[in-house]
Image (cartoon, rainbow, N blue to C red):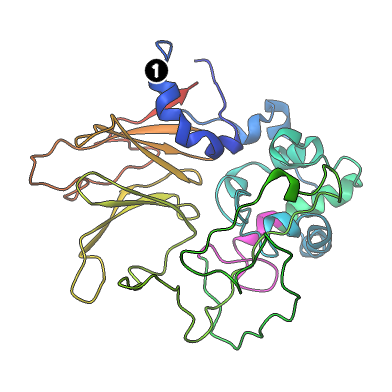
């Protein structure tokens, strides 16, 4: 069967894909299949790590990782923004030879530089450190479940106000609109490219989103594992992509105290999901399209009566090895 990879930056085009895909008469659907880590060749998969499991090599790799990798992938491998985590997901299931190959080769189209300039021993040490991340309770790597830091005092920023029309969180207010024109932007290559991913911190005491008059903001759900996107189905169910958890959750209804009446897992076993789209448009979609890090999958919505909710019942769960009761397909552009 022919393999057609879908690349990591797929999320940028997800909102346009329902139109593009279904307007084309050449859309092809195939059974989902497992592909190698970033299409590493078979020879790379079989290469063995000479430092596998060695603590001194892992400690040396941690130092290299802090200098070369942490600014994008996070200090503990949790990922940031569109950059996938390394402490869990495909990086942990891939062979060490495949990871070494990818670190060496890089992928410029997806923002991953080649580290062939690093000594071979250092590249293997980084691989050794990455493979110990998920097993480390603290210090040398993260646990598989993201945790919110304990509440602590957060100092106010003393940075000068941004030059108009730009702003930052200190000056944002509901209803305030700022127009940024081409003339306000810096010239191309005015400064060197840099990556400055976010760091999760505890919410300061009494900090809360501001809302316009007549509206109120309440906490609906918490304890999620890197939620990335919400989509509201026509019946009011909220579908949420839980990226680090590898699943799609459904939140239904609201209780008198502002919490969901039901929370269910609609699909699991996904690879870093971040995009959701219903098809066909309208009040009765039949499919949910989910963008993974390396593919787009189509999941069928269970048939229902008009008074029923989607994803109801005990059968509302899908896994990579057991696609029933949903029909899962990989979409090929």
Where does the magenta region start and end? Answer: 130-145
Residue 95 vs residue 307, the one in the foreground:
307
Using the image, determine if residue 212 lies above or below residue 120.
below
> What type of secondary structure mainly makes up the magenta span?
loop
Quarter-wise, where is residue 72 in the image? bottom right
Using the image, determine if residue 58 lies above or below residue 297.
below
- Mark 1 surroundings: few (<14), some (14-19) or many (≥20) residues within 10 A: few
* Residue 175 percent coordinates (x, y): 46, 64
Using the image, determine if residue 47 lies above or below residue 145.
above
**Does the magenta run of residues contain 136?**
yes
Q: Residue at x 45, y 55 (%)?
A: 245
* Residue 309 percent coordinates (x, y): 16, 48
Residue 23 vs residue 330, the one in the foreground:
23
Using the image, determine if residue 99 lies above or below residue 4.
below
Q: Residue at x 62, y 36 (%)?
A: 37
Say what secondary structure mark 1 lies in. Answer: helix
Residue 69 vs residue 123, the one in the foreground:
69
**Does the magenta run of residues contain 313?**
no
Confirm whether residue 52 shows in the render. no
Confirm whether residue 269 shows in the render. yes
Q: Which residue is mark 1?
A: 23
Instruction: Classify residue 8 as left or right of residue 26.
Output: right
* Residue 35 percent coordinates (x, y): 55, 30
Quarter-wise, where is residue 159 in the image? bottom right
Q: Residue at x 64, y 63 (%)?
A: 198
* Residue 143 percent coordinates (x, y): 56, 66
């Amino acid at each position: 069967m022919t393999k057609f990879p879908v690349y990591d930056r797929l999320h940028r085009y997800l909102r346009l894909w329902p139109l593009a895909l279904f307007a084309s008469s050449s859309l092809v659907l195939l059974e989902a299949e497992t592909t190698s880590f970033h299409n590493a060749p078979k020879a790379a998969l079989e290469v063995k790590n000479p430092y596998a499991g060695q603590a001194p090599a892992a400690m040396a790799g941690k130092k290299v990782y802090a200098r070369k990798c942490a600014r994008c992938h996070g200090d503990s491998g949790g990922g940031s923004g569109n950059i996938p985590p390394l402490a869990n997901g495909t990086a942990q299931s891939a062979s060490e030879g495949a990871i070494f190959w990818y670190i060496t080769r890089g992928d410029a189209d997806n923002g991953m530089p080649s580290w062939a300039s690093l000594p071979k021993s250092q590249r293997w040490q980084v691989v050794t450190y990455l493979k110990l991340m998920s097993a480390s309770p603290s210090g040398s790597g993260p646990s598989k479940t993201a945790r919110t830091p304990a509440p602590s005092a957060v100092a106010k920023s003393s940075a000068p106000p941004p030059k108009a029309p730009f702003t930052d969180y200190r000056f944002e207010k509901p209803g305030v609109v700022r127009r940024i024109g081409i003339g306000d932007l810096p010239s191309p290559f005015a400064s060197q490219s840099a990556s400055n991913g976010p760091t999760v911190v505890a919410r300061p005491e009494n900090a809360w989103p501001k809302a316009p008059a007549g509206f109120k903001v309440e906490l609906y759900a918490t304890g999620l594992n890197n939620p990335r996107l919400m989509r509201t189905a026509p019946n009011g169910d909220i579908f949420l992509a839980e990226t680090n958890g590898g699943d799609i959750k459904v939140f239904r209804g609201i209780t008198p105290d502002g919490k969901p009446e039901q929370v269910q897992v609609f699909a699991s076993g996904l690879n870093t999901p971040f995009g959701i789209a219903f098809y066909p448009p309208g009040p009765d979609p039949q499919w949910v399209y989910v963008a993974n890090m390396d593919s787009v999958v189509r999941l069928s919505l269970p048939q229902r009566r008009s008074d029923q909710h989607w994803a109801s019942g005990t059968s509302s769960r899908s896994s990579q090895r057991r696609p029933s009761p949903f029909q899962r397909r990989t979409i090929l552009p």
